[in-house]
Image (cartoon, coloured by chain):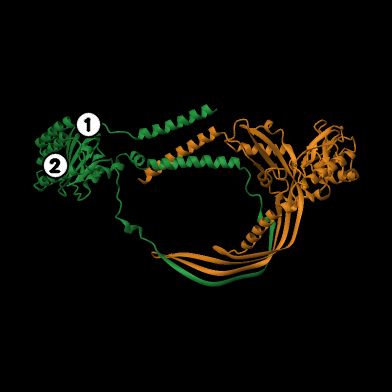
Chain colours: A green, B orange
Amino acid sequence: MMKKLTTRVSALALAAMLVLGTLLTAFAASPASVDDSASIFSADQKSEITSRFDRTGDKTGWQLILYTSTKGVSSGLSNYYNQNYVDRISHDGDAVVLVFDIGSNKGAVISHGSAESYISDERLSEMGSMLRGYLDKKDYYGGALAFADKLDQFYADGVPKDGSYSNVKTNEKADNKLLYVLSHYGWIFGIIAVAAGVIFFAVNSYRYKNLGKSGTYDLHANSKVDLNEVQDDFITQNTTVRVIRSESSGGGSSGGDGGSSHGGGDF
Amino acid sequence: MATMNYKCPNCDGPLRFNPDKQLFTCEYCLGEFPAAEVQEMNAKAEQRETYDEREVKQAEQAKQEAKQQGAEAEDEYPVSYTCPSCGAEVVTTSTTAATTCFYCYNPVVLGSRLSGEFNPDRVIPFELSKEKAMDRFLAMCGKKWFLPKGFASKEQFEKLNGVYFPYWFADEQKTAHMTATGKKIRRWTSGNKEYTETRIFHVVRGGDVTINNVFERALKNESRDMLQSVHPYDMTKAQPFAMSYLSGFQAEKRDLDKKDVEPVIEQKMHQYAEQALRDTMDGYDEIIVDDFVEKTDLSAYTYNLLPVWMVTYKFNGEILPFAINGQTGKSYGKLPVAKGKLVAAAVIVALLVFVLGTLGGLLFA
């Protein structure tokens, strides 16, 4: 009986792990591409950029994507294009996306997978400054090639030893919510779960050992009060006031932060 | 008083009290007799004191005197009687007032245990038969998931014994007076401000408080927890004591005097009186009692025998008592726990909590 029960519990635990594991799926691979929605490149330029990106891709194992847009997004480009473009295309796990928003003349670099570790905050800033120069000159073609050169350099230099990755962390939960929740709050849920189990065990043990101990005397049914003196004299009153803090004063509005996890920054 | 067994006027077979019918029944001729009839038939016999019993009484008195003079003596010691049915020797403890002869299985009531100062005032006759008590117990076990397999079986509780246990009950009328500070609190919100208005009152209550049926066990060697926890009983159904009710059951004589239980009962009475008066201060959100005084005007203690079905069972080397109120069926006891089952259930609960927490996290992340 005990063995059966243990087997059932183990099977249940295994099933739960499998369900959780299935949700933790990874990306699949695909080649470099240029998606020129803003129509700023000639066919030759697109071909040149693609072959240049492929060379970097062969070296690094990353998929390089160039996307041009006329949306005119002026802030939060990396999040916006991660949700509205990168997540809609089928991209590899290891990828770097360069976005040129012609409408706002701004750009963004979005990294995924292993590329994220090579593009630290410092390197992203360096890349952004460099690309900003090309944007200012409206030299999108030159910017795309320089982007590939810079990635080659970052790859050759390896993963920075003391790099910071705030750009990656801010969007971690968007990549795989379950992984994010488990990695950040799993230990809390674990403690709560263990506490719940222990409380369940203790409460049931106590109830079994103390069956029928309560409710032995009913005062209401066994007492009678005949009052001959009743006074309820008002003495004083006071009123206190508490200011309720407005919830909206705490911060800005929270927009949707969906989409996959990525490293990224605007320029 | 005599060592009694109550006999059927038709066939001379032993009479036992039947809780289901609230009648005395003869298991040989199936005759049924009301309690009053049996009491009347045996009234004279109950008054007769046999030679056997006189001897036992004298031995007990000698023991008491020796104890008073400082001699070492056990509170409980074996006492032997002669069974009025078969003549066999019935060995009981010094507090046993009714039992069954181990040879002929006829009920024996040891009258001297319940005479004089030990004569109970009231008795609540068994209302729950052994079968019904067992059914109640097994139904209760059916709802307990973590009992060891095979525990909740009729065989386990075949040895259920009907026992009348002795209790002291007290009724008191008191004059009581309480002063308190009462608070009425009102909250409301206007704009971004929350207002809390507290009105303070001087509250006085005085009057007569009657508290009834405060009880305390009158047998020191039995588990106090068990004897206290089988309550409550419906004392309105208590009958004036008659020895015949004990026929077919075991009964225990009290070994705690009124003075032994008085401090505990008086403490309870004080608490209950305070609570009863406090409960009349309704309409307040908070009450702080500033002063409470009470004086007892009337006090009455009675000695009662109350019915309990009880059994002890052995589990993992530990002997555990189990008791069922012989009137209401309320159960008390230490139930054994199948730790494996409970651990497995606790693991499942923990897993569920973890999964629910994670799902909640996914919703709010």
Q: Chain of mark 1?
A: A
Q: Residue B201 appears in which quarter of the rendering?
A: bottom right
On the question of residue B139 being in view, the answer is: yes
**Residue type of the residue flagged with mark 2:** Ser
Q: Residue A251 appears in which quarter of the rendering?
A: bottom left
On the question of residue A68 being in view, the answer is: no
Do the residues at discs 1 and 2 belong to one chain? yes
| Numbered circles on residues, count | 2
Q: Nearer the viewer, residue A250 or B173?
A: B173
Please, what secondary structure does the residue beneath circle 1 have? Answer: loop
The N terminus of chain A sits in image quarter: top right
Q: Nearer the viewer, residue B74 or A81?
A: B74
Q: Residue at x 44, y 43 (%)?
A: A192
In the rendered image, residue A221, in percent from the top left (x then y), is placed at 68, 55
Q: Label 2 neighbourhood size at 10 Å, few (<14), some (14-19), many (20+)? A: few
Q: Nearer the viewer, residue B97 or A230?
A: B97
Label placed on residue A39: 2
In the rendered image, residue B87, in percent from the top left (x then y), is placed at 87, 32
Q: Label 1 neighbourhood size at 10 Å, few (<14), some (14-19), many (20+)? A: some
Task: Decide if residue B292 is on the left or right side of residue A247.
Answer: right
Is label 1 or label 2 in front? 1
Q: Nearer the viewer, residue B305 or A180?
A: B305
Please, what secondary structure does the residue beneath circle 2 have? Answer: loop
Of callouts 1 and 2, which one flags the residue occurring earlier in the amino acid sequence? 1
Label placed on residue A129: none
Task: Decide if residue B245 is on the left or right side of residue B153.
Answer: right
Label placed on residue A30: 1
**Residue type of the residue flagged with mark 1:** Ser
